[in-house]
Image (cartoon, rainbow, N blue to C red):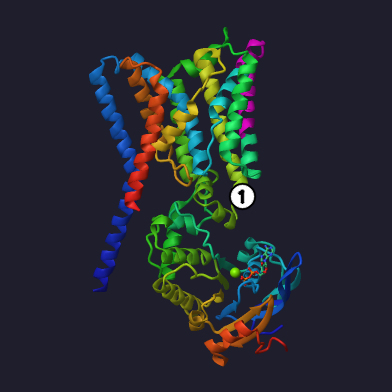
Amino acid sequence: MSKEYFFEGHEITKMYGAVVANYKITFGVKPREIIGLVGDNAAGKSTLIKQIMGVEHPTEGDFFLDGQPVKINSPMIAKKLGINSVYQELALFPHLSVVENIFAGELQCNKLRLLDWKAMKKKTIELLERLKIEIPVERSIKNLSGGKRQEVAIARALLHNVRLLLMDEPTAALSVKEREKIFSLIRDLKEKHGISIILVGHNIEEVFEVVDRFIVLSNGRKIADIEKSQTSVKEIVSIIVHGSPVGESFN
Amino acid sequence: MQKIAEKKQNVEKTVDNRKIKLSKFKREFFLVLTIIIVGVILSLLTPYFLTKGNLSALLIGLSAEGFVAIGIVMVMITGEIDLSVGGIMALSSVVAGSLILSGKNVWVSVLLGFILGSIMGVINGWLIGYRKINSFIITLAMMGMTRGVAYILTQGSPLAIGGVPQSFESLGGGNLFGLPTFTVVFILLASISGFGLKKIKAFREFYFVGSSENSAKLTGLDVPKIKMRAFVLSASLASLAGIFTLSRFLVATPNTGNGIELRAIAAAVIGGTSFTGGEGSILGAALGVLIVNLLNNALILLNISVYWQNFVNGLLLLSVVLIDNLTQKKSD
Ligand SMILES: Nc1ncnc2c1ncn2[C@@H]1O[C@H](COP(=O)(O)OP(=O)(O)O)[C@@H](O)[C@H]1O
Ligand SMILES: [Mg+2]
């Protein structure tokens, strides 16, 4: 296991019956790094993300955190390990306030076992301030724009200490302007908060702007693992389209 | 410069919060206004409206619906519906009544009737929450079955229960703090539920499930269990309404709570409960119950045939839904 990686996957294989969604994918994540996880439709990107998040479990292969093998049996465990994700469908609650959305699934109670809205509101305000996100915390999600909703979803993933943030197509449903905002937030997360991110996206040109490294999947296999400085948008697109292996994948 | 900008932002924030608070209570405000206006009109039209006898009849009358409406609000917040409340009310009332008539201890009988009614909620919750069957269909079937059993047990005729202890009679017939005990208990239950929906996790979770079931699943909420909770609460409240009604009339009839689902759902919707889930307030529903009953009281006081009641209740529900539909379109 390499020293520069704090999180690693070793020969991760995931079968759905006869379908090989992931096949012997080995990869590592460095601190303060944004990885663009790209590939054609059905290449296996979401499957890999779900396994790191503990939603799905590898048929074979292991994950390592700080060099130690870890079993990520559930999203709860992933969160405890400092891994969290922003779901493509955001998983927000339209009728409820920003505070409630941030604390969904982990509402906090006081000593009397009553919901402590004051504390949750305070923590939400602090969290949003830390991320430089400006949203009135009492507003319902349904009264927010798509971009703001995305920001709430990201903020929620960062409520607890996060080392690795997984984002599966986070900008799929957004306008160009909103996308720019999200990408600048992603950059901030890395630079100001030291968080590593695995970002799944299909617009290579856009993803190219923020990532440090590309991992390309094709038919469930890793066919390229390449630093951004060593490649170009054109080359990545060509790898995805032609499936020609480059980089260290066949070492 | 920056200070000024910051200040401006803070002012905007508080204005924003105030707006939200206002809009949250706007509906309740209109409901209270409506109640006052209808009350004033009624008292001008007939001097009988403000008599102690009429007001106390009005309050006792609305209490059973109040019990039921609380449960309906909880179920509707989760995005489901419970049509079986009236049937469950009749079932628990008739079962308790039959047991009393057979010589069993009154309180044991009442407890058994209540438990049986609540079990109907467990069945609803299991089929809807865990088996994921549509709540409209399940509770429609349950409505038929529960009321059916009430008819079978009584063979269709009312069972008069005499000689019950004063303590039981006073549940539905007595007074407490100058109000009918029935109404005091309703106010108590409504306060607890209203408080619970805001401050108790097990209740608050209803809103999450109703707002987005998929999101609730993804955030790790136990959706089936939460739905089960709502249906059991609804059935228990309906059973309790049945028991109180039995105590009030000292007669167990299989048509107890007939049509109460329509009035309770109307009250909930008037009070701002959404029939697609995620929204609902107990205070609103309580005011809704008051409005529905004021209207029915008006029909009686104005000597309008009782045959108009169902029509008026239905029309009221339709109108509120239409008004909501029109005003929501505007604000979207
Ligand atoms: N739950 C599942 N059951 C069966 N097959 C699945 C399941 N999830 C994904 N797959 C299959 O695994 C492959 C990879 O899917 P996915 O990881 O979603 O790809 P991507 O996110 O790159 O588009 C696809 O062939 C897909 O049909
Ligand atoms: Mg995908």
Residue B3 coordinates in the image, percent (x, y): 26, 70
Q: Which one is in front, A212 or B179?
A: A212
Locate the C terminus of chain A by quadrant.
Answer: bottom right
Q: Is residue A169 above or below residue B210?
A: below
Q: Which one is in front, B164 or A8?
A: A8
Left or right: where A30 falls relative to B9: right
Figure quadrant, ligand 1: bottom right
Query: Does the rendering let one see residue A113?
Result: no
Amino acid type, label 1: Asp
Query: Does the rendering let one see residue B221?
Result: yes
Q: Chain of mark 1?
A: B
Q: Which one is in front, A124 or A251?
A: A251
In the image, what residue occupies the spot 53% across and 26% down? Answer: B86
Would you name the residue on which mark 1 appears? Answer: B222
Residue B212 coordinates in the image, percent (x, y): 52, 52
What residue range appears in magenta? B96-121
In the image, what residue occupies the spot 29% across and 14% down? Answer: B48
Q: Is residue B186 above or below residue A71?
A: above
Left or right: where B232 falls relative to B49: right
In the image, what residue occupies the spot 31% across and 56% down? Answer: B16
